[in-house]
Image: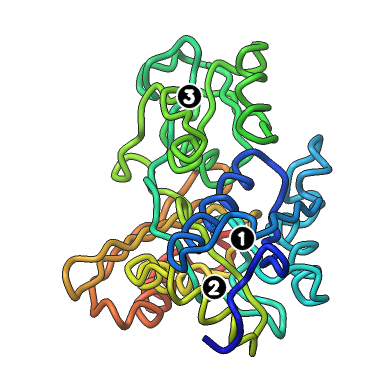
């Protein structure tokens, strides 16, 4: 090791949002590090940082600034030295990191599928004509609008618990969450069904946790290398390159999923008009180690087929 391991006297500070899911992800990171090095939990300190995206709940993400809303304050604390590592849902992460920060540690990926959640309806196909469905995800809304233009789609923000309460209060008859989040919260039974990826291609990096660090912090780099999941890293290299080329943000409906097949990688991608009027999708296969190039190539192909002004 470059330096001494964390200890109760000098704990490693783990920065995170304060939602129950974000805390579960921070605890998983802590527990994996503790297990890898035989350390007590007291050798780690969870530091909760308030982020803009959690504080403003009454507006759509695209109105208040997109993806950086869930990461900016945490990354500022990391750069300032207030924390040693930052734990993020990779689905929320912008494709580029601030200068001085590095993202090269991913935990094993959870279930990538979307969960259909409803108190009264068993499955997506069973939604009645004109049903009110809540979602804050532009991607899910566009996919739904494409398949079921009869549905009424309403804005539905908040953490998992908040959205479940909105359903119970009758704000909507159904919503969608990530199966990964429900699994990590021990709430898998809240899903009426998991939606097959062939039916609803998930968001780029859905189900993945990333751990960010300061560039040049050798001690932390050594720690994180011990818990990095190579398979997840290979898959996200392709997906995030795809997103980067498309200039993906919370304002752009984009779906993408990479799957390893031995030494090869199968990447599927989809771009949608926000109103669901048009979908352009495709897939490519290539060497698992060439994921970034594959992601860029697939994005270029879809953009070429979509034509200018597709996202306008």
Q: Earlier in the sequence, mark 3 or mark 2?
A: 3
Question: Are the residues tagged 3 and 2 within 8 Å (C-beta)?
Answer: no
Q: Residue at x 32, y 39 (%)?
A: 199
State whether residue 155 is above or below residue 298.
Answer: above
* CA neighbours of label 2 inside 10 A, class few (<14), some (14 to 19), many (20+): some
Q: Is residue 75 left or right of residue 206?
A: right
Looking at this view, is 193 or 211 the one in front? Answer: 211
Q: Residue at x 40, y 21 (%)?
A: 192
Q: Earlier in the sequence, mark 3 or mark 1?
A: 1
Q: Nearer the viewer, mark 3 or mark 2?
A: 3
Q: CA distance from mark 2 to mark 1?
A: 21 Å
> Dot 1 lies on which element?
strand
Q: Which residue is mark 2?
A: 244
Q: Earlier in the sequence, mark 2 or mark 1?
A: 1
Q: Which residue is mark 1?
A: 87
Q: Nearer the viewer, mark 2 or mark 1?
A: 1
State whether residue 16 is above or below residue 79.
Answer: above
Q: Residue furthest left?
A: 262
* CA neighbours of label 3 inside 10 A, class few (<14), some (14 to 19), many (20+): many
Q: How many marks?
A: 3
Please state the horizontal and vertical placement of residue 70, each as a whole percent of the image. Answer: 71, 55
Please state the horizontal and vertical placement of residue 57, each as a whole percent of the image. Answer: 79, 37
Q: Nearer the viewer, mark 3 or mark 1?
A: 1
Q: Residue at x 65, y 54 (%)?
A: 251
Q: Which residue is mark 3?
A: 117
Question: Are the residues tagged 3 and 1 within 8 Å (C-beta)?
Answer: no
């Amino acid at each position: 090791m470059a330096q001494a391991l964390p200890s109760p006297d000098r704990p490693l500070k783990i920065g995170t949002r304060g939602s129950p899911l974000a805390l579960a992800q921070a605890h998983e990171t802590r527990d994996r590090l503790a297990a890898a090095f035989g350390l007590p939990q007291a050798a780690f300190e969870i530091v909760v940082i308030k982020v803009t995206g959690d504080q403003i709940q009454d507006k759509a993400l695209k109105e208040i600034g997109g993806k950086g809303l869930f990461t900016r304050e945490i990354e500022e604390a990391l750069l300032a030295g207030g924390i040693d590592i930052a734990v993020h849902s990779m689905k929320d992460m912008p494709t580029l990191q601030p200068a001085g920060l590095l993202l090269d540690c991913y935990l094993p990926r959870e279930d990538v599928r979307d969960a259909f959640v409803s108190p009264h309806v068993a499955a997506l196909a069973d939604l009645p004509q004109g049903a009110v469905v809540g979602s804050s995800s532009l991607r899910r809304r566009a996919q739904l609008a494409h398949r079921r233009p009869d549905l009424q789609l309403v804005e539905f923000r908040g953490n998992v618990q908040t959205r479940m309460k909105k359903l119970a209060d009758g704000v909507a008859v159904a919503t969608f969450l990530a199966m990964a989040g429900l699994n990590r919260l021990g709430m898998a039974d809240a899903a009426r069904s998991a939606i097959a990826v062939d039916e609803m291609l998930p968001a780029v990096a859905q189900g993945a946790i990333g751990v960010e660090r300061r560039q040049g912090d050798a001690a932390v780099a050594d720690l994180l290398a011990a818990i990095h999941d190579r398979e997840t890293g290979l898959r996200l290299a392709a997906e995030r390159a795809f997103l980067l080329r498309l200039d993906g943000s919370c304002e752009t409906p984009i779906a993408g999923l990479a799957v390893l097949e031995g030494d090869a990688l199968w990447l599927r991608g989809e771009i949608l008009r926000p109103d669901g009027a048009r979908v352009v999708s495709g897939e490519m296969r290539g060497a698992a180690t060439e994921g970034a190039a594959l992601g860029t190539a697939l994005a270029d192909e879809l953009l070429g087929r979509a034509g200018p002004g597709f996202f306008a």
